[in-house]
Image (cartoon, rainbow, N blue to C red):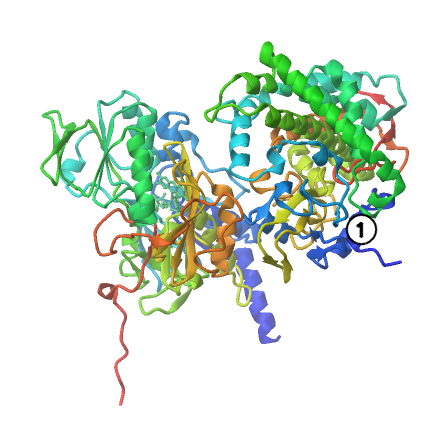
């Protein structure tokens, strides 16, 4: 038998009877499982999730669910095909032993694998003071239960809601409150809403949008403490300028934390920004060496991106979870040269204050912005972001149908400013600074991050010099 | 004689029943310059790119060759009585911001969730009744015409109801539409004596039709009635009201598109299923396949084979060709939907085809306004046809085709049947 035949035989055998474990039973985990079956994997498949629920969809949580349109338990993700898996729900993975190829569960069980997919996503960053965070009426939104509880309280309705942090989720919550006619105050440490993700120029428009809809928006300020009543219910917030806001519901939307703690000691390149992997989803170990049996997908993954100077990108986007999972799953049951890269142009959508906001590419990678179509005054427009004469991202307000055009330009590293459209040109098409905050300034963390090298993360084992 | 290009051959009447071999040839040059200066785009990828390119205009007034301002003796890519007779633009012949504003104004009266999310789905019982009535009417017959007896009456009745156009007027505008379409030719035969002689009649028909629409709108202005047209005349949208001329032009568009395309799609669906007995049998056994099935039928025999009002506002570099500023661009949807680069085994009919994002309704900002209604009508009509008609057999293949190339469809589809089930 030739070597090639042996390898082919091994792949066949693995597909037929290998053991694959997926940790994280949400969007990325489910789509990966489906893809594995689609690709002809008939071996054993175990899916471990710490939430008690079958995989459900998160984007509706801060939109339709809060409005009361859709009950939180009606957000189950549609199944694209039978996955025939051993579902281990309601139990967390607590450790990974790469030497024996086992995942440790919170109940002490050990689950062996031949190949492992890490899809543990992120969790909401909690209000930093634990006592204050424990007050009734203080929320974060990441899970079904979070959204259900908050929706219930919004339906009462509260006399005022305080939203801390005006990133996408905070802004969506504020928008829902206004739609429900609930007074809402938004406190944002940065100069404007969405500033981390879209920069100050767009942030200014988002701020106008909020004010027009009656949001009490306070930027450049922080919340220093929350105050409860004797019953343990939140009633008031103290802001960094000494002022106070009376509110009986507080939503902390302070960005997210990657669920990597369970990987501690595994020797994988896992840290604050997620688990490092190559463009095919294969995890790196702490020395930057690619592993053969461990893969990563979704919010928890960070991989180098060709379009963005091979910087490591972490993308907290729905599309990224789906497509990253599909690519990783494909690679898990194939061999070189049939690996598939996950080279997605990041894309995001959000609905707030009646406007559909979409972006493509990585806006914070750019330093200039130019309006290319539509009208800022009417809040229907497209704008492009550039860096050193190249287009790197675009954003649209109620103009999403044009995003594909900008996506193509970005893929081709087209010029910035991009070629002007023949019609519907905004009056002022001059590029201007996009006004992203200095990345060192603490502010709402954008949901695509350039996770460049952090020296404090350097845990590689340096080889001793031999004479 | 100069040899004809694949596109010219595809447009010849003799090839109407089967333009696909010529499309195949055409796709070898994704963006093909024609002798008259038109650029024909035939591959999926390139069409989608241009549909999303803001340098591509849909407004013929902005194209020196297509526009009404063209000079006598200049290159004419096609004889187009409809556009020439219409003075005001409609949503399909204008660009943003006008396009966006007018479409936004019309949308809530048609299918605009969240404004009227049930408007279309609430029509289903009525559509079922109509389809049932048509099939009941075939009882006792051994031979039917799937066009005249089935495909035509349904969409006409439905669009009249949705828009609020009196059904009694149907014979009049049916005649105008036929006359206009018969005078419309984009192929080498446009120069023929026959088509030239029809041109004047076509223009007149569109003018008469426009007159009819204007009068109808006036009547509704005096006395509001049911349907979308009356609502548009009488109710202010968030951005005000549309001018009467623009509204009349759009009314014309909707009546036109609302039945031509659907008639052809139903007729083609029946024809296609009769040509593919396996698929027909599968659909009979698994009626739930009607939803993906209709998408496949839309891909397989696109109702709108190409669209012809677009032009380049700048030089556009695409697929190795430069479309110069001012050039007319024809997007050949019918060809893109059979592009093997996009669809595996594109000439096979697969009612369960996955990843079937066809261009049967186009894409981008001009995505078919009536798509939700068309889908529902065709799903009900074809589903019931398959379920109720006993042992249908095609009498003549290929059937005779209508003249028009854009709204390509058979004039008659004769079918022998054993009976009608309950
Ligand atoms: C409120 C909200 C609104 C959003 N809106 C949008 C939007 O409009 N557009 C958009 O593009 N994206 C949006 N997103 C982002 C999108 O939902 C995420 O990108 C997507 O859910 C990522 O999927 P994932 O599977 O990688 O991670 P997750 O969905 O976070 O899933 C990870 C799963 O792993 C579980 N887990 C974690 N640790 C362990 C462990 N140790 N053991 C077992 N299980 C574990 C978690 O509990 C979770 O169930 C939104 C997110 C939220 C929360």
Q: Name the quadrant containing residue B162.
A: top right
The C terminus of chain B lies in which quarter of the figure?
A: top right
B347 to A79, vertically: above or below = below
Q: Is mark 1 within 8 Å of ligand 1?
A: no
Give the secondary structure at mark 1: helix
Q: Residues within 10 Å of mark 1 (few under 14, many from 20)?
A: some
Q: Name the quadrant containing residue B151.
A: top right
Front residue (pair B20, B134): B20
A159 to B85, vertically: above or below = above
Front residue (pair A114, A213): A213
* Residue B60 place in picture, x, y as percent: 64, 42
Number of disc labels: 1
Residue A1 appears left or right of B304? left
* Residue B371 place in picture, x, y as percent: 62, 32
A304 to B139, vertically: above or below = below
Residue furthest front in the image: B72
């Amino acid at each position: 038998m030739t070597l090639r035949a042996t390898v082919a035989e091994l792949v066949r055998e693995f597909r037929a009877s290998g053991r694959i474990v997926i940790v994280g039973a949400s969007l990325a985990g489910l789509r990966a499982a489906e893809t594995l079956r689609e690709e002809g994997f008939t071996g054993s498949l175990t899916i471990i999730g710490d939430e008690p629920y079958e995989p459900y969809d998160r984007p509706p949580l801060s939109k339709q669910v809060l409005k009361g349109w859709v009950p939180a338990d009606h957000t189950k993700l549609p199944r694209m095909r039978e996955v025939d898996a051993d579902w281990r729900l309601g139990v967390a993975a607590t450790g990974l032993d790469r030497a024996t190829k086992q995942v440790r569960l919170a109940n002490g069980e050990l689950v062996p694998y031949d190949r492992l997919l890490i899809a543990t996503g992120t969790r909401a960053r909690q209000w930093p003071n634990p006592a204050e965070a424990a007050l009734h009426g203080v929320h974060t939104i990441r899970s079904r239960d979070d959204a259900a509880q908050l929706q219930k309280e919004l339906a009462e309705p509260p006399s005022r809601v305080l939203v801390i942090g005006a990133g996408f989720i905070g802004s969506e919550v504020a928008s829902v409150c206004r739609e429900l006619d609930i007074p809402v105050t938004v406190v944002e440490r940065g100069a404007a809403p969405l500033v981390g993700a879209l920069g100050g120029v767009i942030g200014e428009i988002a701020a106008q949008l909020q004010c027009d809809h009656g949001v009490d928006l306070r930027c450049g300020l922080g919340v220093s403490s929350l105050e409860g009543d004797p019953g343990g219910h939140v009633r008031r917030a103290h802001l960094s300028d000494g002022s106070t806001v009376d509110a009986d519901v507080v939503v902390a939307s302070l960005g997210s934390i990657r669920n990597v703690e369970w990987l501690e000691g595994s020797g994988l390149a896992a840290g604050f920004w997620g688990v490092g992997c190559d463009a095919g989803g294969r995890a790196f170990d702490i020395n930057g060496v690619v592993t053969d049996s461990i893969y990563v997908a979704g919010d928890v993954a960070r991989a180098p991106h060709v379009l963005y100077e091979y910087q490591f990108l972490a993308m907290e986007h729905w599309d990224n979870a789906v497509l990253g999972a599909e690519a990783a799953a494909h690679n898990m049951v194939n061999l070189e040269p049939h690996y598939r890269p996950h080279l997605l142009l990041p894309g995001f959508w959000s609905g707030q204050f009646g406007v559909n906001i979409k972006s493509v590419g990585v806006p914070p990678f750019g330093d200039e912005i130019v309006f290319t179509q539509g009208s800022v005054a009417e809040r229907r427009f497209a704008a492009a972001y550039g860096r050193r004469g190249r287009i790197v991202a675009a954003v649209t307000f109620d103009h999403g149908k044009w995003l594909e055009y900008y996506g193509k330009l970005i893929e081709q590293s087209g010029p910035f400013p991009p070629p002007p459209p023949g019609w519907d040109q905004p009056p002022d098409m001059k590029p201007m600074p996009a006004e992203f905050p200095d990345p060192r300034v603490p502010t709402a963390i954008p949901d695509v991050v350039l996770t460049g090298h952090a020296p404090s993360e350097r845990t590689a084992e340096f080889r001793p010099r031999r004479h | 004689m100069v040899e004809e290009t694949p596109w010219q051959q595809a447009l010849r009447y003799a090839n109407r029943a089967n333009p696909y071999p010529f499309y195949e040839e055409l796709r070898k040059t994704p963006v093909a310059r024609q002798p008259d200066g038109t650029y024909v785009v035939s591959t999926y990828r390139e069409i989608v790119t241009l549909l999303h390119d803001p340098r591509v205009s849909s407004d013929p007034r902005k194209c020196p060759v297509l526009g009404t301002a063209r000079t006598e003796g200049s290159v004419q890519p096609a004889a187009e009585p409809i556009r020439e007779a219409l003075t005001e633009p409609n949503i399909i012949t204008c660009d943003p911001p006008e396009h966006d504003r007018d479409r936004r104004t019309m949308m809530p009266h048609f299918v605009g969730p969240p404004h009227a999310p049930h408007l279309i789905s609430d029509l289903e019982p009525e559509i079922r009744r109509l389809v049932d009535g048509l099939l009941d009417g075939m009882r006792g017959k051994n031979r039917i015409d799937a066009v005249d007896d089935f495909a035509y009456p349904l969409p006409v009745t439905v669009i009249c109801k949705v828009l609020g156009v009196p059904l009694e007027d149907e014979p009049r505008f049916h005649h105008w539409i036929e006359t206009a379409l018969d005078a419309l030719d984009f192929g080498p035969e446009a120069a023929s004596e026959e088509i030239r002689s029809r041109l004047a009649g076509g223009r007149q028909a569109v003018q008469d039709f426009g007159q009819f629409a204007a009068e109808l709108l006036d009547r509704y202005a005096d006395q509001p009635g049911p349907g979308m047209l009356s609502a548009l005349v009488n109710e202010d949208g968030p951005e005000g009201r549309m001018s009467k001329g623009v509204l009349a032009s759009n009314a014309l568009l909707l009546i036109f598109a609302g039945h031509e395309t659907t008639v052809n799609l139903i007729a083609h669906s029946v024809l296609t299923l009769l040509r593919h007995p396996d698929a027909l049998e599968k659909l009979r056994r698994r009626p739930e396949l009607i939803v993906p099935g209709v998408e496949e039928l839309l891909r397989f025999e696109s109702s709108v084979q190409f669209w012809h009002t677009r032009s380049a506002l700048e030089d556009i570099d695409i697929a190795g060709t430069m479309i110069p500023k001012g050039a007319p661009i024809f997007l050949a949807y019918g060809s893109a939907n059979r592009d093997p680069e996009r669809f595996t085994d594109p000439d096979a009919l697969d009612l369960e085809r996955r990843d079937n994002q066809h261009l049967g309704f186009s894409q981008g900002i001009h995505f078919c306004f009536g798509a939700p209604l068309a889908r529902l009508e065709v799903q009900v009509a074809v589903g019931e046809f398959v379920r109720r008609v006993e042992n249908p057999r095609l009498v003549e293949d290929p059937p005779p085709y209508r003249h028009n190339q854009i709204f390509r469809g058979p004039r008659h589809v004769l079918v022998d049947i054993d009976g009608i089930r309950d």
